[in-house]
Amino acid sequence: MANLLYEIGTEEMPAQYMPGILKEYRELAAKKLEEARIPFKDVNVYGTPRRMAFVASDVADKQEDSTVESKGPSLKIAFDGDGNATRAAQGFARGQGVDVKDLVQKDGYVYAIKHLAGKKTEELLPAILDDILHSLTFPKTMRWADYDFGFVRPFRWMVALLDDKVIPVEANDVKSGNQARGHRFLSNH
C-alpha cells in the first residue's frame, strides 16, 4: 500500500472557483482510480489559489484481477446439428482471443470468459493522472503560448508521487517532479 500525491501548481486562480474545482478534483480522482480497478482507502483534496492537490491513501500496488464475460452468438448459430462449431462460433472465439473449446454455453448463447491479471499501479498511473488533468472543467479556461490545452490558469509545476517514486506526467511542457513551490514571497523557490 502506498500514498499517491498529485499536485498542480498554477498562477493565481480566482478564489470563488476553488470550492468547485476541489470538489471535482476529488470526484475525478476517486472515479478514475475506481474505473482502473485500483483499490484505495480514501481521497483528500487540498487547495489554495495557486495549487490544488489530492492525496489518495493506501493505494494498492496493482489493480484488481478481473473476469470479463462476453456474450456471443446463440447456440443455434454457434453449433451445427452434429455439435461442431460453426464459422460464427470460430469467429467469435478468435475475436475474443479464446479457443473455441473454451466457449461456455448458457442461457441459449455462447460466452467467452476471460480472466485478466491486474497490472502494476505504477504502470497505469501516468495515463490516469493525465486523464484527470485533461478532464477537469472550469467556468473559464485560458490558453497560453502556442499550447492547445487550456486550463483555469497557466500551470507552472506538477508533483506526482507514489510514495517517493515520481510518476511521469507532462502537459504544456511542464513535467511532473517531486518538488512543490512554496509561498511566492516567503520562499526561495
Image (tube, helix red, strand yellow):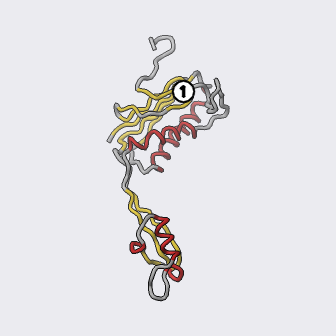
Q: Is residue 161 above or below residue 73?
A: above
View extreme (right): residue: 140
Q: Is residue 48 above or below residue 107?
A: above
**Number of numbered discs:** 1
Image coordinates for residue 147, horizontal then vertical, percent: 62, 29
* Residue at the image point whose x is 61% and y is 26% from the top: 153
Q: Is residue 82 left or right of residue 138?
A: left
The amino acid marked with disc number 1 is Asp
Image coordinates for residue 52, horizontal then vertical, percent: 51, 29
View extreme (left): residue: 1
Q: Is residue 2 above or below residue 156?
A: below
Q: Dot 1: within a 10 Å radius of its alpha carbon, few (fewer than 14), some, or many (20 or more) residues?
A: few
Residue 86 visible in the snapshot: yes
View extreme (front): residue: 87
* Residue at the image point whose x is 44% and y is 69% from the top: 112
Image quarter in which the N terminus is found: top left
Q: Nearer the viewer, residue 17 or 124?
A: 124
View extreme (bottom): residue: 81
Q: Is residue 97 above or below residue 45?
A: below
Residue at which label 1 appears:
173
Q: Nearer the viewer, residue 126 or 16?
A: 126
Callout 1: SS: loop
Image coordinates for residue 10, horizontal then vertical, percent: 55, 24
* Residue at the image point whose x is 47% and y is 30% from the top: 7
* Residue at the image point whose x is 40% and y is 42% from the top: 123
Residue 108 visible in the snapshot: no
Q: Quadrant of residue 152?
A: top right
Q: Quadrant of residue 116?
A: bottom left
Image coordinates for residue 189, horizontal then vertical, percent: 46, 14
